[in-house]
Amino acid sequence: MSGHSKWATIKHKKGAADKARGKLFAKLARQIEVSARGGGGDVDANPTLRTAVQKAKGAQMTNDAIERAIKRGTGESGDDIVYETIMYEGYAPGGVALLIDVLTDNRNRISADVRQVFSKLGGSMAEPGAVGWQFSRKGVIITADGIAEDDVMLAALDAGADDIIAEGDAWRITTEPSDVFDVQDQLGGAGIETLSADSPMVAENLVAVTDLKDAKAILRILEALEDNDDVQDVYSNFDISDELMEEAAAG
């Protein structure tokens, strides 16, 4: 079970996403723009755009904001900002691997920003390929707490999910990346409430973190990277107990 997944769940429950809703919407809009620029503005004909739009709707981004982002991407709005996709790799304390997914209009700026985070908070940059081989993309859905295992199992299997794993009092459902939002919709139709759905990079092998100092340092690095407007997602391979995660997240 990924510590990063637990961290995302904790942030959701604490309302951290609500506090940073403006920043979140800006990142989602950028993903929509890049998807529309690369494959056109037709959601039905552009699977990457469809995924970006579904992710935005899941975060309660308005249809008007989504449409404006699509028009910026296709050039209909007259804006001409070109974003570059970069995946940085690095290590946090305890040998924890990190993948930093970036969309930026200034490679030099974001490169300096990422290096500064690692330098100040105790991590280190890695060469391209040193970390990425440990990860593969999967669809991941997190349910609400307190749903019976039999109910989740039946609904998830009927929806075409690959696996179901206990995540504290909730459930972590994995799917093919392209199926994640369809499975989420079917779960909702079966009365299964979900907290989140995404298609992140997931590590095959996890690194156990048992030291509170390391756990706090890892979360500080995650927060600093995620606070950068150019950073779309940060993926990691740390495994941590619920108790230690709560203690580290508390400060």
Image (cartoon, helix red, strand yellow):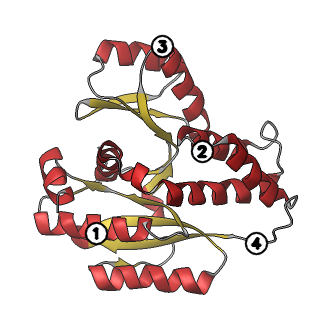
Q: SS class of the residue under badge 3?
A: loop
Residue in view at x 86 percent, y 66 percent: 78
Q: Residue 220, labelled with which disc? A: 1
Please name the residue that numbered disc 2 is placed on.
Answer: 61
- What residue sits 18% from the left and 68% below the top? 214
Q: Position of residue 197 (x, y in %)?
A: 49, 38
Lower position in the chain sequence, tag 3 or tag 2: 2
Inter-mark Cα distance, 3 to 2: 24 Å
Q: Amino acid at mark 3?
A: Ala
Mark 2 against mark 1, which lies toward the viewer? 2
Cα separation, mark 1 vs mark 3, equals 38 Å
| Gap between marks 2 and 1 measured at Cα | 27 Å
Q: Earlier in the sequence, mark 2 or mark 4?
A: 2
Q: Amino acid at mark 2?
A: Met
Labelled pair 3, 2 in contact (Cβ < 8 Å):
no
Q: x, y (%) of residue 251?
A: 17, 63
Q: Pick whichever, 41 or 134, lies toward us.
A: 41
